[in-house]
Image (tube, grey):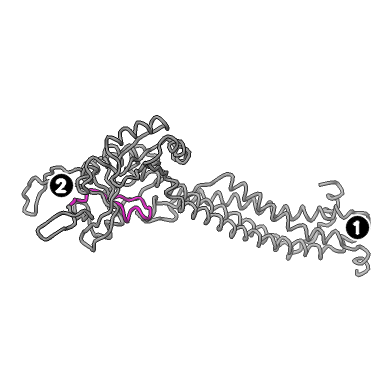
Amino acid sequence: MGFETFVVSRYLRSPRKDRSISIITKISIIGVAIGVMTLIVVLSVMNGFEKDLRGALQGASGHLSVYSFVADGIHTLEAERLEKQIKEVIPVEATAPFINRQALIMGKNKPMGTLVKGIDPKKELGLVKMGRFLRKELFNVKRDNHSNDEDQIEKSRIEAEKILERLPSHIETVINEKGESKQVRITGIVIGSQLAKNLGVEIEDDVTMITPEERITPMGNMPRAKRFKVVGFFESGLMGYDELLSYIDIEVAQKVYRIENRISGLAIRINNGEDADLLKKKLVKKISFPYIISSWIEQNKNLFAVFHLEKLGLAIILTLIILIASFNIISSLIMLVIEKSKDIAILKAMGATNQSIRNIFIIQGSIIGFAGTLIGEVLGITLCWIIASFDIIDIPAGVYVGNRIPMHIEIWQVLLIAVVSFLICFSVTVLPSHKAAKLDPIENIRNE
């Protein structure tokens, strides 16, 4: 601000405070602050939801999956050769075979459809973070996905390992209602939490799985059925997983579906799941027909597209709050121009330039915008920290991948919000400043 502009601003500053202009100025600052704060909080929540979702999707399945165009799947010997070839092309942390099939599962309530996934219990633990998802209680355990408690993580891993150990067919000692113990052969199954709720089953309950495979009986061809014992629940909080998925041992799945020595595909875990698409391109160049390779990002691209669209829509809508608040700045400055028209006319008659008059109104509006933006930034970041640190809003267990409202602040978003807010507030000062600069000093002094 030049010396001439400084002198003009001191002259325009009336010793008597105009209450109406002061109130509108405060409303303008509050409006801008609320808009900026809301925008930061909402985008941080959306970022947190997306971050948790991406982590859960990577933890629930492999980063890359290799399938075969052949209907019968991949032979186990062929899978071993394929696994070695994959490790020569990209860095691999773990691999695990799997079988995907459909079935009808029967519990205490009405039958439900399920996606049966046959897994190798030992290899699956190295592939995905099963400790985060496997449990023996239904919707009763809260889980903080951001916890770094190593003891709790290790405890969850050991519990998941014990659950998966009961998947293969084995002998267990059970006690009947009379208190008598006997040896029985059981085959375990892990059921999605929402699916288990719909079936009305608990841990140690029996369920019957009916597959499309047929068997010949004296009454004709009948679907194959097998009884399983529920040994655990799979609870990820992801729609489409907890209400459909069931885990059984891969060897049991091969027998039930009559595909001995064959698997549906290989799941691959890499160091950084975000590089899945990049590494997939490398694999495609070396491994082609009859194999098809997909990444977890590709499999869930529609879901992430919805998230990005929602964030964009919310950002545009909430930016309108700042835009609406900025109109109060116009009102405040126009009222100031009307109130100080005589003073402006005198200053212009004394030799003040249009630019100096224009600058003072632009600076005043910019200060209002800067103050509102700064207050909004501080309040927004503080509110995000409070929501992330304290259980203000509680999420029931099993509804979401975590039990807290997720918050993830992106620094570039905070800076972008500040820049956009300030530019909006700066741009609305053009009209009042132009109006003040174009006042005719002769007309205003004559009217007085």
Residue type, label 1: Lys
Residue 201: x %, y % from top left: 22, 57
Q: Does the magenta run of residues contain 234?
A: yes
- Say whether residue 217 is left or right of residue 260: left
Residue 226: horizontal and vertical position, in percent? 17, 52
Near-viewer residue (388 or 89): 89
Residue marked by disc 1? 348
Q: Which residues are magenta?
A: 227-245
Asked if one can make out residue 30 in the rendered structure from this viewpoint, the answer is no
Residue type at mark 2: give it.
Ile
Q: What secondary structure is marked by label 2? A: strand
The residue carrying pointer 1 sits among few (fewer than 14), some (14 to 19) or many (20 or more) residues within 10 Å by Cα, namely many
Residue 445 makes an appearance in the image: yes
What residue would you read off at disc 2? 186
Residue 413 image offset from top left, x and y in percent: 58, 48
SS assignment at label 1: helix
